[in-house]
Amino acid sequence: MKKNPSETTVGRFRREWSAMTFYERFEQLVALVLGLFIAIIIVLSLTRLMMSTLPLLFGGILDPLSPRVFTNLFGMIMTVLIAMEFKHSIIRVALRKDSIIQVKTVILIAMLAIGRKFIILDTTKTGAGTIAALAAALLALGITYWLMRERDDHEREREQAK
């Protein structure tokens, strides 16, 4: 289907809705409900983060340069960012920009989550085995993402060469 640049998202959604099968409509509804649910969680998380930290910060009680405080704050911020990326991937499905959740996006979200874990990790209480396992998982995800990106780049080059 050709996309009309002046057509609104809602108009395009209505047009595509009529062409969808029952299962595609079901997928769209699930994606929209999940997107709304995650958006509510993001708003609530951001509100809680602001309500709990801003008064302490402006009152001088909270020292953002303290390593423990910094890792806790940064961990909460990373959690909100991970939720936003997750919501973005679901909304892409709902807007029919992608037909399914893209594996590369899930891998990136997993990499963000492990990165967050490294940031909030208390190295005094964490064993070397746990750190090595997290590092190995992050490396495996990174390699998988790189391989998938290389494959997609080669497919794109082949299509352009045609």
Image (cartoon, helix red, strand yellow):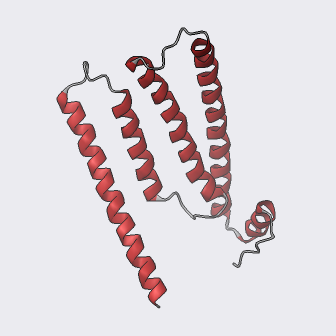
Left or right: residue 106 compared with residue 36: left
Which of the two residues, 4 or 38, is positioned nearer the viewer here?
4
Left or right: residue 26 compared with residue 108: right
Give the percent coordinates (x, y) of residue 9: 76, 61
Give the percent coordinates (x, y) of residue 19: 72, 72
Q: Which residue is pictured at 32% across the width and 51% down the height?
A: 141
Q: Which residue is pictured at 61% across the width and 39% down the height?
A: 38
Looking at the figure, which quarter contains the N terminus?
Answer: bottom right
Left or right: residue 39 compared with residue 72: right
Q: Quick one: which residue is furthest to the left in this view?
A: 128
Q: Which residue is pictured at 76% across the width and 75% down the height?
A: 4
Q: Which residue is pictured at 61% across the width and 14% down the height?
A: 58
Which of the two residues, 61 or 87, is positioned nearer the viewer here?
61
Q: Is residue 38 depicted above or below 56 in this figure? A: below
Q: Is residue 47 depicted above or below 112 in this figure? A: above
Give the percent coordinates (x, y) of residue 48: 62, 22
Q: Is residue 2 depicted above or below 143 in this figure? A: below
Residue 66 picture quarter: top left
Q: How many marks?
A: 0
Q: Visible in this render: residue 114?
A: yes
Q: Visible in this render: residue 27?
A: no
Q: Is residue 106 depicted above or below 37 in this figure? A: below
